[in-house]
Each structure stands twice: as C-alpha cells, then as structure tokens.
Amino acid sequence: MFDLEKSIADWRKQMLAAGIKTPVPLEELEIHLREEIERQMKSGLEEREAFTSAVQKIGQARALKTEFKKAGIPVEMRSVKLVGIACGAVAGFFSLWILFVLLTVHEANLAERALGLVGITSIMLSWRYGYRFLPAISSWPARAAIEAACCLASVGGMVLFIKIIPYFLGQIPVGQILVSSLWTWAATAILGGMAYGLEKAARKANEQYV
C-alpha cells in the first residue's frame, strides 16, 4: 500500500543526498511538493500518481541542486556582506595604524599601549570566533536587515569620529587620544564584521541541522 508520508520522507533524503542541505530551501520545496500533490489529487489522481506527478513537476534532485547553485546568495545579501567586510577592513587598517603610532610615540604610557593591543586583539577574535556568539538567523531578509544596520552603524561611527576628534586635539594627552581613536575604529571594525559573522553563524547552523 502506498504511504504518502514515507514517500515524501524518502524524497527529502534524495534531496539531501543530492546536496540540497540548507533547511530553508528544502522546507520550501517540501511545501511546494505537498501543495502540488494536493492539487493533483483534487484533479482526480490517486495519491501515488499525484506524488509522482508532483515530483516530476518540481524537478529532480540534481536539476534542483544546479538551480540552487545558480541562484546562490541573493544579491542583497552579497552586497550587504561585502559592505560589512569593506567597513571592517578599513576600520581594521586604521586601528593597526593607530596601534603602530601608539607603540612608538613617547607620550603613550604602558597602560595605554596595553589597551591598544587589547583593542586589536578584540578585532581579530571577533572576526575569527564572533559567529559562535551570534544568533543563527535562517530568514535571509531579517539577516540582511540586521547586517545592514550593523554596516550603517559602522559607517556612522567612522563619520562621527572624524567629525569630533579635532575638538579633542590639544585638550587631552596624546596617549589617551590614540587609545580612544583605536577603540572607536575597533568598534566599527567589529560592527562591520558582524555581516560576515551572521552569515557564517547561519551556515554553521545549516550544517549542524543536516
């Protein structure tokens, strides 16, 4: 006797074996499959025939995998991710440059230099391991919105810093200015890197799901 649920489960296994491992596309495909089966049955077909027809209409596993590869990450996601990486790279570069000045200028004391090193270390650790502490957001529109907000905050931090730093020159010690500058750029680098981190967190969650 034909078992529709078992057949759908076997179909899911074929999709996974073919390489369609991301939960969201696979769930969407199953929804479409079930809807198509329902339409076929309403037109008069038996469960077995409706299932076979629906599978043929949706497509075979290899063909679907090829289509997913062509589609890839939505353009919006790629753009946001690239902007985030660019912001993080620019901010990271300036942080390194300020650290170099901080370590070589005579006016900076040991504590200020140590704070500078901690700032750079924070950037590196956040980019390397930050995704482990970020939520795995499966919905790409929601993820894109959060990443875009991080990018805007990163750019905003850079602009704000450039505008206000002249007011502090000559008002506070050089070492403090350098430390404050480094940590400002470090914060913008970490924010920019969250676009990369959120993508990686989602990808790791998908791999664990499978």
Image: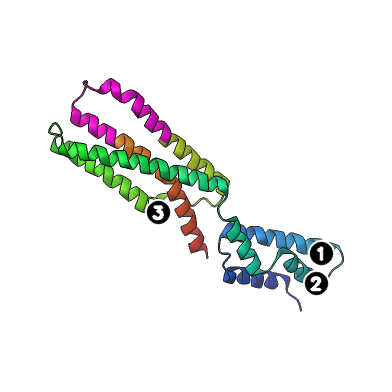
4, above or below 198, in the image: below
Is residue 143 shown to the viewer in this render?
A: no
Give me the C-alpha separation between circle 2 and circle 3. 46 Å
How far is disc 2 from disc 1 in space, using C-alphas?
8 Å
Residue 143 in picture, x, y percent from top left: 52, 46
For badge 2, the amino acid type reads Glu
Q: Does the magenta stretch include residue 143?
A: no
Q: Evaluate whether residue 46 shows in this view.
A: yes
Label 3 belongs to which residue? 132
Chain part drawn in magenta: 155-182
On residue 40, the disc is: 1
Which residue is pictured at 73% across the width and 71% down the height? 4
Give the quadrant of residue 95: top left
Q: Position of residue 34 (x, y in %)?
A: 73, 62
Say if mark 3 contacts mark 1, CB within 8 Å.
Answer: no
Residue 181 belongs to magenta span: yes
Tell which of 26 and 164 is nearer to you. Answer: 164
- Tell me the element at label 1: helix
Q: Mark 2 points at which residue?
A: 49
